[in-house]
């Protein structure tokens, strides 16, 4: 009955809007609804130097007695308020940030609607091209909106204005109150960070990533590899550590570039969202499989002699490793753990460490990345560089103090055993990636993909066992074909739909309901507490929080005592609604946890959830009394 009643409300509301849109269509373009909102645009400075950031405030004035739909309306069939700038060709894409909406109760809909009233400030950040000539540039601004009063909603319409940008020297602040009211820098939850203040949490977040389960096996292998190299020349140890650092930094610069390209194309951006692409996840599973086989000594990637010599390394075959003594095998273990063929191996191990870090989050990291992704391109590059420096800190310290390798355990046969154990940990990560792929493709396709990985390992094993060049070439060719087939299987995979509790996997202790931000606000307005969890199968930190904090009997009892509604949003696959929701809090990565509470703004938790903090927030929000 309740479901039928809700369906009926949605149908009645939809019919009102459909009727209004049909009226506009029937007029054949001759009917334009009356303007119920206007827009003006202002700049923060009187003039700008080429290559500098610009802040624009669009002030939307709404007629008394009318509302316009939020940028994130309550229902998909409603028309969102959207601001568009017609920038000259070649200019970077502008970053547009919309204000928080109110929940407005109309007479034609039983549920409150997300809307703006009176005045709404929309802030725009853009970066001028460095080669811009001196003069004035007029930028047309268009606002698309749908206005409603207590009884009816009008068809969508537009309001236009123009903002003029004077290009020359850096001018004086205009002093417009729109910039004082909402200081168009980072969103509220970013804590009003400046670039300098954001670099500190970026460095700390990158450093903490070294201890996260995604990266720890790689860091351990590298450090123990350096320990075995403790007797080697200082130049070799320093060079290897610096090349690993360079691999990390280049990878983060590539991530920053990809982020900027995605943002300029209007795509959602965020930390770790590349794991929403099954081809990327499959590629990483291939790399991890090969890395495990490499750590176990089944093969090595040999560079041409000229290139290897230039990079300070040497080539070494798996066959040679098997034909020597155990002591030489330990040296080969160091060679593999250290990164393969000389400096190039150290560089690519840094790249690999970065790839493994992206599905993890850490304290401070969400704040820094969230701030960066709402800023111009230069800020994104600086913050991503700081995260990379934090991740590379162990290697930078080793480069500064190469004698510190003597403090590490003495080399010995135990390192070969440890290397084998680390190989199993990396193989375990491959299994985790297959678990992620289970939500991104059907079971039959996944089964064939797993057979492909097994075939790849078989061919690698065969080539490592053979002394004949023809058979070794056959094994490598077979492995290459298997790898291509695995990637082809991943291409074109479709996401699998699941219920709200399916993302966590295993036993569900909490009674999760599907994520609905409008419903969360409505329940909070009615006096209920709502806990929102944005998670994904590829988010390792999410899984740790779920196992240690959320999916426990203590948390279940806490939620029952205070009548907390648990909502879960699954971001395993691409979902632009979830991306916009995170951006509204100044976040662009997960895990994300928010507690909606009556009469207050939602409380946002740290990425590493703690049971004590969760209980304290719920108890304080409920006024200390159980519901």
Image (tube, grey):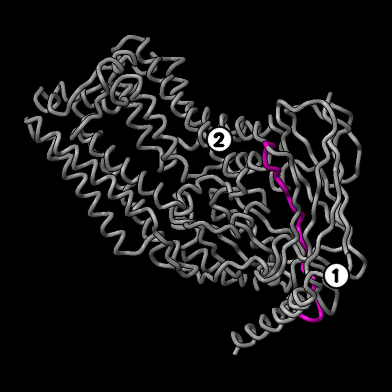
Residue 239: x and y in percent read 39, 15
Q: Are marks 2 and 1 in contact (CB under 8 Å)?
A: no
| Residue 33, numbered label | 1
* Residue 447 seen from this side: yes
Q: Is residue 283 magenta?
A: no
- Count neighbours of disc 2 (C-alpha within 10 A) and say few if under 14, some if 14 to 19, many if 20 or more: some
Segment colored magenta: 90-109
State the CA–CA distance, disc 2 to disc 1. 43 Å
* Side of 565 relative to 163 (left or right): left
> Looking at this view, is 433 or 133 the one in front?
133
Locate the N terminus and report the quarter of the image it occupies: bottom right
> Looking at this view, is 171 or 186 the one in front?
171
* Residue 528 seen from this side: no
Q: Which residue is mark 2?
A: 257
Residue 600: x and y in percent read 75, 61
Does 241 sit above or below residue 442?
Answer: above
Q: Is residue 106 magenta?
A: yes
């Amino acid at each position: 009955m309740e479901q039928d009643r809700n369906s009926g409300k949605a149908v009645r509301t939809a019919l009102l809007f459909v009727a209004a849109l049909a009226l506009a269509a029937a007029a054949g373009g001759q009917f334009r609804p009356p303007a119920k909102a206007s827009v003006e645009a202002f700049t923060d400075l009187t003039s700008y130097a080429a290559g500098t950031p610009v802040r624009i405030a669009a002030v939307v004035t709404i007629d008394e007695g009318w509302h316009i739909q939020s940028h994130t309306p309550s229902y998909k069939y409603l028309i969102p308020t959207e601001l568009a700038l017609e920038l000259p060709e070649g200019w970077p894409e502008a970053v547009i940030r919309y204000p928080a909406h109110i929940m407005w109760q109309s007479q034609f809909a039983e549920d409150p609607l997300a809307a703006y009233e009176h005045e709404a400030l929309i802030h725009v950040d853009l970066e001028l091209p460095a080669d811009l000539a001196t003069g004035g540039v007029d930028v047309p601004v268009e606002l698309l909106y749908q206005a409603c009063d207590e009884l009816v909603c009008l068809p969508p319409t537009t309001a236009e204005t123009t903002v003029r940008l004077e290009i020359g020297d850096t001018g004086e602040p205009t002093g417009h109150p729109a910039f004082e009211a909402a200081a168009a820098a980072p969103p509220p939850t970013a804590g009003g960070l400046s670039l300098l203040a954001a670099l500190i949490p970026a460095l700390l977040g990158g450093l903490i990533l070294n201890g996260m389960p995604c990266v720890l096996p790689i860091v351990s292998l590298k450090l123990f590899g350096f320990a075995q190299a403790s007797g080697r020349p200082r130049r070799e140890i320093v060079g290897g550590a610096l090349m690993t650092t360079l691999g990390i930094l280049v990878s983060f610069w590539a991530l920053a570039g990809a982020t900027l390209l995605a943002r300029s194309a209007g795509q959602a951006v965020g930390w770790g969202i590349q794991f929403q692409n099954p081809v990327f996840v499959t590629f990483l599973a291939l790399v991890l499989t090969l890395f495990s086989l490499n750590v176990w000594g089944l093969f090595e990637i040999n560079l041409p002699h000229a290139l290897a010599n230039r990079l300070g390394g040497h080539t070494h075959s798996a066959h040679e490793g098997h034909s020597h003594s155990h002591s030489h095998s330990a040296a080969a273990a160091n060679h593999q753990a250290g990164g393969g063929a000389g400096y190039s191996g150290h560089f690519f191990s840094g790249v690999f460490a970065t790839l493994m870090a992206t599905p993890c989050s850490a304290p401070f990291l969400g704040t820094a990345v969230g701030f960066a992704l709402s800023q111009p391109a230069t800020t994104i590059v600086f913050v991503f560089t700081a995260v990379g420096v934090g991740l590379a800190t162990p290697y930078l310290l080793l480069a500064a103090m190469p004698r510190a390798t003597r403090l590490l355990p003495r080399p010995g046969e135990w390192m070969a055993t440890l290397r084998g154990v680390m190989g199993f940990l990396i193989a375990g990560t491959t299994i985790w990636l297959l678990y992620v792929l289970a939500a991104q493709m059907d079971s039959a396709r996944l089964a064939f993909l797993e057979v492909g990985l097994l075939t790849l390992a078989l061919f690698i094993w065969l080539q490592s066992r053979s002394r004949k060049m023809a058979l070794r070439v056959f094994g490598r060719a077979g492995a290459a074909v298997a790898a291509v087939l695995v990637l082809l299987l991943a291409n074109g995979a479709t996401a699998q739909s699941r219920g709200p509790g399916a993302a966590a996997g295993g036993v569900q202790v909490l009674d999760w309901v599907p994520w609905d931000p409008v419903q969360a606000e409505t329940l909070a307005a009615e006096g209920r507490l709502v806990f929102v969890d944005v998670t994904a199968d590829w988010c390792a930190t999410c899984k740790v929080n779920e196992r240690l904090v959320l999916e426990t009997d203590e948390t279940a009892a806490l939620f029952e005592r205070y009548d907390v509604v648990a909502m879960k949003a699954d971001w395993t696959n691409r979902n632009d609604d979830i991306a916009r929701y995170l951006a509204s809090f100044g976040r662009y990565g997960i895990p994300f946890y928010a507690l909606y509470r009556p009469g207050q703004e939602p409380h946002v938790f740290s990425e590493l959830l703690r049971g004590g903090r969760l209980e304290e927030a719920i108890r304080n929000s409920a006024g200390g009394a159980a519901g």
